[in-house]
């Protein structure tokens, strides 16, 4: 049986290592994009915290502004009241009284507005606190995920270096003709496997039925046989 032949086993080992390399290269190529996506998520989460904090700070600034306006109006009212004590004409007194009433109305409106702002500040403060707590935890998790990806990238690079050496060793041990056929198949076939067992007269690489000649060659002649559909090397497993 070809699958038990020592020389064919060397080719199987090379094939196994090549497939591992392909898988690791694919993983390595995907890691930078995964890191970028994780960094984007971290940025979005941090921006969410900033937005919540900005809303809170904006309301605090609005409250401070209203506080100043109310204080200013109150001072104007006191000045007008003091002026009332100094005027002698009734019409001047009444004019000041009307201005005082207008200022008190404005003061009342500002105080009502301030109460609304204070309520919104309480809500915004709680929202910011909850957001910061939850989002910070998510950011920590994402940072751990990012660190893991960076560490994995380093690990894969190291593993690839070792594996490339193993592949070179395997290639040196495979018979020249078998290696030539194998390399040609790797160029023609778009994706692994390049060696595929036959199952129910079907190539497990392309899942298509092979001819009787291919089956006969794989079973009887026990030589390197290629699928007449996809070109992969096919063999019968024990």
Image: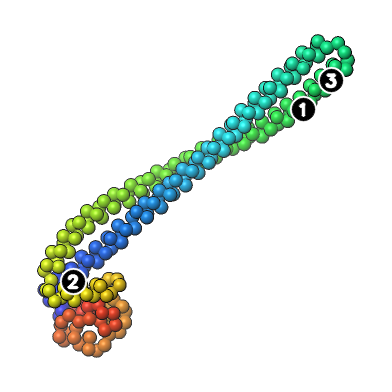
Asked which quadrant contains residue 124, the reply is top right
The residue to which callout 3 is attached is 95
As drawn, 130 above or below 94: below
For image coordinates 43% across by 49% down, the residue present is 40
Along the polypeptide, which appears first: circle 1 or circle 2? 2
> Could you tell me which secondary element the residue under label 3 belongs to?
helix
Disc 1 from disc 2: Cα separation: 92 Å
- Would you say residue 138 is visible in this rendering? no
Tell which tag, 3 or 1, sits nearer the viewer. Answer: 3
The residue to which callout 2 is attached is 12
Along the polypeptide, which appears first: circle 3 or circle 1? 3
Please indicate whether residue 188 sits to the left or right of residue 47 in the image. Answer: left
Q: How many marks?
A: 3
For image coordinates 29% across by 52% down, the residue present is 153
Residue 64 coordinates in the image, percent (x, y): 61, 28
The residue to which callout 1 is attached is 105
> Could you tell me which secondary element the residue under label 1 belongs to?
helix
Which quadrant does the N terminus fall into?
bottom left
Tell which tag, 3 or 2, sits nearer the viewer. Answer: 3
């Amino acid at each position: 049986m070809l699958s038990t032949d020592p020389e064919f086993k060397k080719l199987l080992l090379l094939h196994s290592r090549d497939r591992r390399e392909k898988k690791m290269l694919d993983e390595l190529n995907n890691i930078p994009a995964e890191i970028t996506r994780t960094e984007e998520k971290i940025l979005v989460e941090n921006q969410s915290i900033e937005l919540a904090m900005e809303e809170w700070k904006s309301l605090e600034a609005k409250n401070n502004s209203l506080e100043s306006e109310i204080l200013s109006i109150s001072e104007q009212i006191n000045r007008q009241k003091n002026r009332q004590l100094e005027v002698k004409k009734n019409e001047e007194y009444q004019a000041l009284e009307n201005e005082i009433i207008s200022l008190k109305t404005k003061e009342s409106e500002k105080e009502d507005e301030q109460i609304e702002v204070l309520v919104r500040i309480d809500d915004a403060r709680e929202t910011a606190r909850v957001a910061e707590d939850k989002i910070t935890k998510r950011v920590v998790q994402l940072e751990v995920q990012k660190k893991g990806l960076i560490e994995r990238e380093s690990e894969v690079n190291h593993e690839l270096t070792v594996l490339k050496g193993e592949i070179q060793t395997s290639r040196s041990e495979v018979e020249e003709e078998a290696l030539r056929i194998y390399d040609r198949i790797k160029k023609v076939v778009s994706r692994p496997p390049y060696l595929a067992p036959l199952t129910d007269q079907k190539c497990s690489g392309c899942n298509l039925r092979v001819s009787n000649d291919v089956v006969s060659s794989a079973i009887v002649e026990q030589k390197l046989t290629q699928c007449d559909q996809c070109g992969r090397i096919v063999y019968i497993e024990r």
